[in-house]
Amino acid sequence: MNIRVDNLTKRYGSQNAIDHISFEVKSGEILGFLGPNGAGKTTTMKIITCFMAPSEGDVRMGDYSVLTDAETLKKRIGYLPENNPLYLDMPVIEYLQFSAAIQGVPKEQVKGRIREMVRLCGLDKEKHKNIGELSKGYRQRVGLAQAMIHNPEVLILDEPTTGLDPNQIVEIRELIRELGKEKTVIFSTHILPEVEATCDRVIIINDGKIVADGAPSELRKQASGAEVSRLRIEDGNPNSILEKLRTIDTIALADYNGFTFTVESKRGETSRREIFKLCVDNNWVITEMSPIERDLEEVFRNVTMG
Amino acid sequence: MNKIWVIAKRELSTFFDSLIAYILLIVFLGFSGFFTWLYGSDVFLTGQASIQPFFAIAYWTLFFFIPALTMKMFAEEKNTGTIELLLTKAVTDRDVILGKFLACLTLVAIAIAFSLPWYLTVWWLGPVDHGAVWCGYIGLLLMSAAYIGIGLFASSITNSQIVAFLLSLLIGVFFLILFQVLANSVSGFLSYVFDYLSISTHFESITRGVIDSKDVFYFLSIAVVCLVATEVVLSQRRLLDR
């Protein structure tokens, strides 16, 4: 099911939590929703899941609108809220039964669905414990299991990996990627590598506005602009090497920190061949030449710090 | 209807999984049993085969116990955030409210049903006015419905269970005592209004063995008004603020 967010605005008093944002997510797409704390990620998700109404604008999924068809939509959405609130006094299995019943899963399918979820989320050992006795990682899995119990077409996950250890994070990411093949998934995070590892597309939101939108690789390209390399050159006097480097036309900046040279080319230019030639001509030995890739972290800082 | 029952069932099993249900049953039966059989104007003192003392004491115990049942209903869910999970499932706000209402009413009905052996015992002791007894039970249930409505409403407007508890007692005390006091201290039309609003007026007339549609309407309308108010409170989050 496609999700179309159209001019969505939510005001709290005079403050805009989200400010006229629009985007679209296609079926089978995993959208990473990125932003600093308080940017409006959770508010957007609460509106998409029909928990809150927008002050302005609309969210449409398929032919349905959150404004008028909440009842229909809620059956098709699986939601893992921020901080993963659960009934801690309930045993895992009972809670999943409750979730299935309340989501209208037909009685004869409930057992099968629960078995499937227990397997998918790796809950087998813990399924008879009370949720309150589980570790944070397992609670998160219960949260995911309840969100998917009715096989929804849309999955909204609000920071699904917070509080998990690195192994669990990898597992949850794999799970999300697996699910994303047939469902529409939106998940929010403020952990950048997570987005690169999982998403087809990233939207960065800051102060209630969308500040970047694209595939993770595209965004990285946007940010990198100029080629930056780290060099280690031996068998020469660093000062003269630096001087010679600066004479190369395509190089905008060259610097030496005592061990390595950092060379930034002019925009759109590459200078690696020139550097190689220069070193050959002078009998210097290049022991390292590695591109410094700008990562999303930098994109993120650039677009959110202004 | 199905969804309402799913929610009610979960609430009920929470009551019985925690100690709440058992404590309620024991304390309710203990208190009312003590005053029915052993203390004050009990059966042996009055020498009459009547369980009116039970109704009189249940009238008070329910006033305290029902807020203890209802206080967590919404306040706790709001506090822990589970309300968000619940209301984004395929249920309406009304399903949730009615489910919780039904769960509380069922538990109170179970508590009241456990007092039936007293009725049978008294019956064995002497002639009982059966009509009055059954009316009394119906009156207790109706009054409980009204208290549960009040309790759910109080619970829906706060995150704190204690606040919810005290608030429902506060609202309850108006219906239980203060309206009666007010009715006696003013005169004319206002006195009539306050008298009408007082629970005791209606409860007494029912336990005398007369089920008047006016009294039934009174209790049910308190419950309904409170449940509607609860729904309004819950729907606040979905209001378009322009």
Image (cartoon, grey):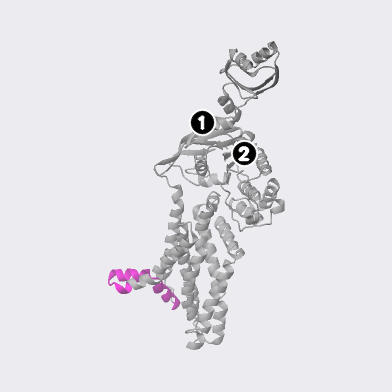
In-image side of A165 versus A210 (left or right): right
Q: The residue tagged with tag 1: helix, strand or loop?
A: helix
**Residue A281 falls in which quadrant of the image?**
top right
Looking at the picture, which amino acid does disc 2 mark? Lys
Report the residue marked by disc 1. A303
Magenta stretch: includes residue B185: yes
Q: Who comes first in sequence, dot 2 or dot 1?
A: 2
Q: Residue at x 61, y 15 (%)?
A: A245
Q: Nearest the camera: B123 or B156? A: B156
Q: Main secondary structure of the magenta part?
A: helix
In-image side of A220 versus B238 (left or right): right
In which quadrant is the N terminus of chain B drawn?
bottom right
- How many marks the image carries: the answer is 2
Looking at the picture, which amino acid does disc 1 mark? Val
Magenta stretch? B183-209
Q: Position of residue A41 (x, y in %)?
A: 52, 40
The dot on residue A256 is none
